Image: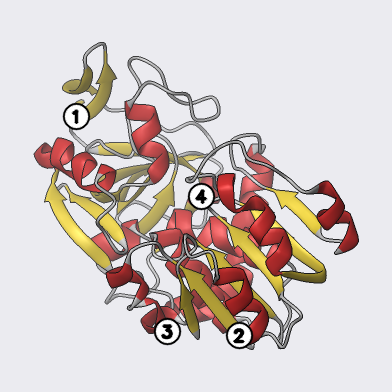
Amino acid sequence: MSATLMKAAVLGDGGLEFRNLPVPQPGPEEVLVRVHAAALNRADLGMLAGHKHGSAGGPGTVLGMEFAGQVAAIGAAVSHVKPGDRVMCSGRGAFAEYALADLGRVAALPSAQTSFAQGACLPVALQTMHDAVVTHGALRPGQTVLIQGASSGVGLMAMRIARLMGASLVIGTSTDAGRRARLHEFGADLALDSRDPGWVQQVLEATSGRGVDLIVDQVSGPTANQNLAATAILGRIVNVGRLGGMHGDFDFDLHALRRIQYIGVTFRTRSVEEVRQINRLMMQDLGQALAQGQLNLPIDRQFRFDELAQAYAHMRSNAHLGKIVLTLD
């Protein structure tokens, strides 16, 4: 590798800036990747606004958290990939010509046919939703599941994972009629509007009055008590996101009456080894399906790297279905 400087998207005092920075060098357990594509996530909007995302964020931060490209260099402890390999990764500093990733967050692209753009869409959604649906959600074959906020990239992946793991009924919600109409393409048997006062009753009707065994909640806020009412006795709610609000009323008596397990998850407080384990379990369960192309995500729109501001604006408009991708080729 001959490059010593790279172009990177950085949070400056006035917002988004492009700077020339030194190419980072991998530590013993890190992989340096020449980035060909990177994908946007909701957390990127918060970081651009100056908010911390765990220990990441703040002025001078190189933005972005998932990417795909070719391995440029490896640390001494890395043995599962080598320079030149085509890989997908999660980690900090994705919006740059080169990015580092912990060895446990680096995986080969699923197949020779997988593009860098498609590969960049997968790591965060796979890690987040295998952890939510399978590890914490404990979904078993024949059970029923509801994905709140199903039209996001991670929401679409949640429905596909639920279907792959043998769910008998998959319900997805979206407040946009156009996106709601397409949820069946990604595994939904029933698509609902979480702003419709009657959505809980529709869930109960679809489950013979029981409620669903599992809710993966990306909305919270005003839907908290409705989620409780839509969950079966001894069911589980896994709280992944709070796009509808960080706070809301919570009916503790209903929670107790239905004996619901309410589980909160985030990557922000997990150790390096915990994240490595999440990836190991995900690849163990989903690796074959990935290789067979069963877990792809739709790309809503692609932007060039120098169009990052427009990409952020597109995500902020909340008009997309699937992933928004930057291309650096």
Tell me the number on the disc at residue 6: 1
- How many C-alpha atoms fall within 10 Å of the one at disc 1: few (<14), some, or many (≥20)? some
Cα distance, mark 3 to mark 2? 23 Å
Q: Nearer the viewer, mark 3 or mark 1?
A: 3
Q: Which residue is mark 3?
A: 292
In the rendered structure, the answer to whether residue 132 lies left or right of residue 187 reads: right
Q: Which residue is mark 4?
A: 105
Which is nearer the N-term, disc 3 or disc 2?
2
Q: Are marks 3 and 1 in contact (CB under 8 Å)?
A: no
Query: Disc 2 marks which amino acid?
Result: Leu
Residue at image point 63% right, 81% down: 165
Asked whether the viewer can see residue 328, the reply is: yes
Cα distance, mark 4 to mark 1? 22 Å
Which percent across, then down, holds residue 140?
74, 79
- How many C-alpha atoms fall within 10 Å of the one at disc 2: few (<14), some, or many (≥20)? many
Q: Nearer the viewer, mark 3 or mark 2?
A: 2
Q: Which residue is mark 2?
A: 169
Q: Are marks 3 and 4 in contact (CB under 8 Å)?
A: no
- 241 w.r.t. 86: above or below: above
Which is nearer the N-term, disc 3 or disc 1?
1
